Amino acid sequence: MTCTCKKEGENFSCSFEFTAEHKKNLNAAEQQELRKVFHNYDLNKNGTIEDHEFKNVMKDLGYRKITDDKVKEMIKEHDHNNDGVLSWDEFVHMMIGFKGKDDGRFG
Ligand SMILES: [Ca+2]
Ligand SMILES: [Ca+2]
């Protein structure tokens, strides 16, 4: 996966790429949607989803009473390189997992 983040003034601009594996699991519209979702929830635009950002994802997916502990637990489950945050790649993998369980509802 590729995430190139560059600082432009006060803003970071990030571009995210889907791997072949992602593309196999997601159609073009879903890929576009996920990119949008990731950008929306990455509030500080650092290219990763931290726990407080992930909490918003889960709330919008319908888990309105999710606790901080549960958020950390879920991040841990999908945090493949154990840096405590979800990268773009990890995020996409997680969403593909949700899709399998949940009719492709991305929230
Ligand atoms: Ca972030
Ligand atoms: Ca990670």
Image (cartoon, helix red, strand yellow):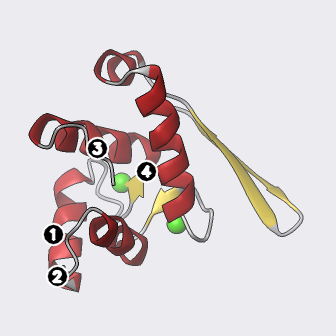
Mark 4 falls on what kind of element? Answer: strand
Q: Along the polypeptide, which appears first: circle 2 or circle 4?
A: 2
Residue located farthest toward the right when viewing the structure as drawn: 9
Checking the image for residue 73, the label placed there is 1
Checking the image for residue 69, the label placed there is 2
Mark 2 falls on what kind of element? Answer: helix
Q: Along the polypeptide, which appears first: circle 4 or circle 3?
A: 4
Nearer to us of marks 3 and 1 is 3
- Amino acid type indicated by mark 4: Ser
Nearer to us of marks 3 and 2 is 3
Checking the image for residue 46, the label placed there is none
Q: Circle 3 is placed at which residue position? A: 95
Q: Is mark 3 within 8 Å of ligand 2?
A: no
Viewer-proximal residue among 56 and 107: 107
Q: Along the polypeptide, which appears first: circle 3 or circle 2?
A: 2
Q: Does the residue labelled 4 lie within 8 Å of ligand 2?
A: yes
